[in-house]
Amino acid sequence: MSFSLCQTLYGQASMMEESPSVKQGDCIYSPFSRTVFFDQDPNWGIYDTSGTLVEEASYRRGPALNLIGQSPSKSIFLDDVAVCEQPCLYFGPLIPHYGQFLVTSLARAWLAIQPNYHDLPLICHSDHDVLDHFKGYMGVLVSALGLSASNFYAPTSDVRFTNLVIPSPAFVEEKLVHPDFVEPMHRIGDALFSSTSRHNNETPVWLSKSRMHKNSVAHVVNEDILEEMLADCGFDIIYPAQLSLPQQVELFSTRRHILGFAGSAFHNHIFSRNPPKLTCITLGDFVNSNLIMLDKINGVDAKYYYAHDNFHKLEVEGYAISRKIIDLRQFVADLLEIAELPGISSAFSTKWERVEKLDKDVANDANCVADLQGENYQSILKRLHVELNPESYLEIGGIGGGSLTVAQAPSILVDPFIQSEAAVKNETSVIGRKKLCLFFQMGSDDFFDNYDPKQLLGRRLDFQFLDGIHHCEFLLRDFMNAERHASRDGVIALHDCLPVEIPMTDRTQNGTPPVAPHRGGWWTGDVWRTLYVIKKHRPDLRVLCLDAAPTGLVLISNLNPQSTRLTTDYHAIVEEMLALDLAQITVARFLEQMDVRSTRTVQEPGSLLSALRP
C-alpha cells in the first residue's frame, strides 16, 4: 500500500466552545490600501476611538492566531474623520480567493441572516469596487443569502461609525469553527440547488485539477492519464473549475462517493445538507486544517491520504506544488482500496491481471509488443506548449479540439470534419485565452494550396501538431508543408507513428482485429512509414521519438524551411514507403531503430526543450 493516512495538520482543528460574540459601539473604519495587498497592509481594520484594534473585527489565522496585515493599534485623529451615525453591521474583509472567501469573508454571515440585522448596511473591506466582486462567486453566494450589492459598502477613507455592530467570526482559519457557521452555508446550498429529488448516485466521482488555469496552487502532471484509468473503472471525471456553483452544490448533494486531490473544491460540501463520503489525496504529508474543520462541522465522513512512496516531486513554473504519480496502476489500485469501493477494485485488479498476462504472452512476439509506458501524449503536448511558449500554432486533424485546448498562442485548426460540439460535451474551451483561433474545415492539401499561415497569423509557425489522415503519403505531405511554413526554431509533432502491433497499422481503420483485446480501436495506419523515411532521408533533422501512450509522439526540430529534399523526390519516396513491410522489419526492431526514449527522460522542467535544442 503506497498510501498512508495523513495525521499531520497544517494549523489546528478545534470546535469553538463558546458562541461567537457581538460588539456594538463607536468605531473607526480604516480601509484597505489600494497599492498594497491586504495581508501586507498594517493600517486596515476596525479600531476603537483610542486606536486599539477591535478584537471581534480582527483577521487572525493559524494556531498562534496571528494578525493578518493589521496592527494591534494605530494613531487616530478624530477631527479628520467623517462620521456615520446610521446603525451598520460589519461583514469583514472580501478576500479575492475562493477558499478564503468562503471560510473568512462569510464567517460573519451568521449574524447577517438574522431578522434583526438583515436590513442593516453591511460594512466591508475590499481592495476594489464591491460591484466587481459581485460579477463572480461572491455575487452568487451572498445573493443566495438574500443580500445584494446595494447592501455592501467599502469606504475608501477612514470613517467613524458611531453605531457599528461587529460579530466575531464563526470560522477562524486553521484554528476554530463554531456550529453557527453552518446555517448560512446550508441556506446558500438550499437556494442554489432547490431540487427535492436529492437521490444518492452511487457512481463515484473523481474531482480533477487537470484543467485548472496555470498559476493554480497545485497540480499533478499526469493526472490526465489517471483520469483515463479511473474513467475506465466507471468513475465520472468532473472538473470543478468548469462547474457553476449551483452545479457544484448539486454534485455534493447527490453523489455518495467523491474522490480527488485535496483542495478548495472540497470546501463546497459545506453547502450540502446531505454531503457525500470524501476520499482526498494530499500532495504533501499534511492536510490543511480548514478542510478538517469543515468536515467536522458538516458531519462529513472524510479521510486524507498521502502517496508517500508513489509521488515524484517536481518544480513547475506557475505552481506552488507539483507532483507526478510514479506508478499509476498501483496508485489506482490503492485508491480503490482506501475508498472502500470493493466491486470496482476487484474489476480493476482482474483487468490488470489480464493485461499483465498479455504483456508476458507477447514478450516473445516481435510483432506484438507491450503497451508503451510513457505519459499520455496529451500530457506531453501540454508541457511542450509551456516550455516552447510558441507565438503561433497549427494543428491538423484535431477533430474535437482536445489537443487544441492546451494551446494559448494564436492558432489554426485544419480538419475536414471539425466537431466543435465534442469540445462542448467534454467541457473544454477550445478557444480559451487565444487572441486568435482560426478553423478551416477542409483537407490539409487544400489548406496549404490556398492559404499562407504566415499571412493568417502574422508570423511563421513555432509549433505544429500533425494528426491527420493515417496514410503515410498524406503525413509526408503534411510534414513537407509544415516545415515549409515553420520558424527556424520551430517544432513539429507527429502522432501515432509508433505502433505496438501489426493489426493497428492497416490502412483501413478497424480492418483487422487486434491481437491484444484492450487495443480495440487503436489505429495508427501506416504513418510509421513516414517516420522511417524522414529519419532516412533527412539526417539533418533532430527527431525525438517518445514512448508516449498509447501510440507514441515524435518531436522534430532543427527544421529547414528551405529544404527541397523531400519535395524533389516525393514520388520516389512514396514508392519506397509503400514497399516497406513492417512484419518483416518487425515492430520490436522498428521501435529499436527509431531510438524510442522514455518520457521519464524528459519529465523535469525544461528537459523537453533541452532535448529539442541541445
Image: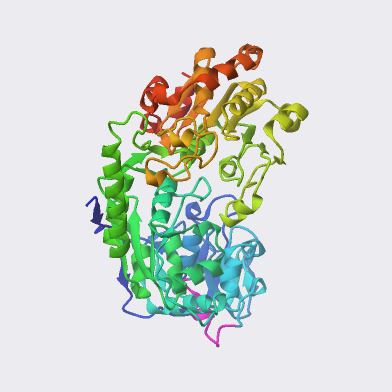
Magenta stretch, main secondary structure, is: loop
* Spot occupied by residue 9 in the image (x, y as percentages of width and height): 29, 59
Q: In the rendering, at what x and y percent does residue 599 appear?
A: 39, 32
Measured along the vertical axis of the image, is residue 215 above or below residue 168?
above
Residue 73 appears in the picture as rendered: no
Extreme residue in the left direction: 1
Magenta region:
107-118
Q: Residue at x 35, y 59 (%)?
A: 280
Q: Is residue 282 visible?
A: yes
Q: 209 or 530: which is nearer to us? A: 530
Furthest residue toward bottom: 116
- Residue 190: image location, x then y, percent: 52, 79
* Left or right of residue 491: residue 68: left
Q: Is residue 113 magenta?
A: yes
- Residue at 34 percent of width and 50 percent of height: 283
Whether 272 is among the magenta residues is no
Q: Which quarter of the figure has residue 171?
A: bottom left
In the image, 593 versus 511, the foreground residue is 511
Q: Looking at this view, is 109 or 421 the one in front? A: 421
Q: Is residue 325 above or below residue 490?
A: below
Scheme by which the image is coloured: rainbow
Residue 310 point in image, percent of width and height: 28, 45
Is 607 situated left or right of 537 in this image?
A: left
Is residue 334 toward the left or the right of residue 149 in the image? left
